[in-house]
Image (cartoon, rainbow, N blue to C red):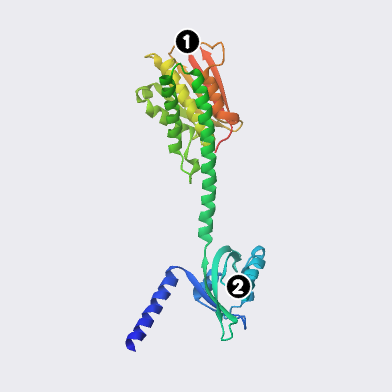
Amino acid sequence: MPELRHLAETSIDHLRLVLEVGKIGVWELDLRSGQAWRSQRHDEIFGYDEMLPEWTYEQFLSHVVEEDRDQVDALQRAAIENGSEWVFECRITRPDGQQRWISAAGSPLRDEDGRVVKLIGNVIDITENRARESRLRILTQELNHRVRNMLAIMRAMISLSSRKAMDVPSFARALEGRIAALARTHDLFQLDNPQKCSANEIIAKEIEVFPEFAHRMDVSANTVARLGPSECQGFSLVVHELMTNAIKYGAFSQNSGRVEVTIDKREDIGVRIRWREHGGPHASKPDQVGFGTRMMKTVLGSAGRVDLEFKPSGLACTIEIDKVA
């Protein structure tokens, strides 16, 4: 008998530890009296530091928010009538006005005549779980939006690139460089921190790809120009296009050529980025809109504008982006 008593005490201690670690409140509702026995954790979940003298089903319902009350009550009545589990999630309001989410489950207990006379169960505060689920839904929606936008940009990019390419190898090289530019921008983003990406960082990443020209670039900014995901993706392709054009045909094709980039944030237009080339070949305006111009205007979309000036000193490009994160 001492061994059995010790085993029972140990089991109770283990159960108590599980309930405490799991922050689980337990309760037993007498359907005949309407009174409920419950643990201290139960009352804490409902916002009471000290256990109340008594707890009734009516008191419980008074804590359930009005929008959830009828459904919770209907589920309880159905569980009693059918002798089934009473399982639900709902919102409650604590005495201090704070609203929380709870998850509860109750099992029926029958008397000798088979009638359900008690419900015994548990209750857990799931507010943090609900908040995480909400954040996950938002992040999933954001991810879906980014993927759709990325695919739209890639479709436009492939279409425009194919028109300009003279042969398959040149098409592949150009496309690979543009996809790499998109990938670099994607790496700047964190789903739970959409403020991560900025025009400043996109330019810095592009310079890292061509370190041999870093000393010939002057970048100045009066702000950290945060951009939304769509704007960052489009802007990264614009910067990549400007950089590769400068290397092939512009300032960087000459030993003395330099590029000056300024970034400023303005209330009237959002973000403005100026790209100015000096010391390179004379920049002549083409007879028709070139591939690079079409590419830049297409990927920026309606939220951005690109203005190109072809000067004797070199290309001058002004980019304005309305939507700033």
Name the image quarter holding residue 245: top left
| Residue identifier under label 1 | 282
Which residue is label 2 attached to? 79
Query: What residue is rendered at 40% in x and 17% in y?
Result: 252
Q: Residue at x 52, y 39 (%)?
A: 146
Vertical side of 149 occupied by 193: above or below: below
Q: Which mark is residue 195?
A: none
Dot 2 surroundings within 10 Å: few (below 14), some, or many (20 or more)?
Answer: some
Image coordinates of residue 257 in percent, x first then y, are 41, 15
Amino acid under disc 2: Ala
Task: Please report the residue visible at 38 percent of the width from the left and 29 percent of the height from the top.
Answer: 208
Q: Position of residue 93 (x, y in %)?
A: 61, 66
Mark with earlier residue (2, 1): 2
Quadrant assignment, res 278: top left
Q: Is residue 131 visible?
A: yes
Label 2 secondary element: helix
Quadrant the C terminus occupies: top right
Q: Would residue 173 appear left or right of 307 to someone viewing this image?
A: left
Compared across the picture, whether 35 is left or right of 154 comes to right
Closer to us: 173 or 193:
173
Is residue 228 something that shows in the picture? no
On the image, the x and y values in percent for residue 96 come to: 59, 67
| Residue placed furthest toward the bottom | 1
Q: Secondary structure at mark 1?
A: loop
Q: Amino acid at mark 1?
A: His
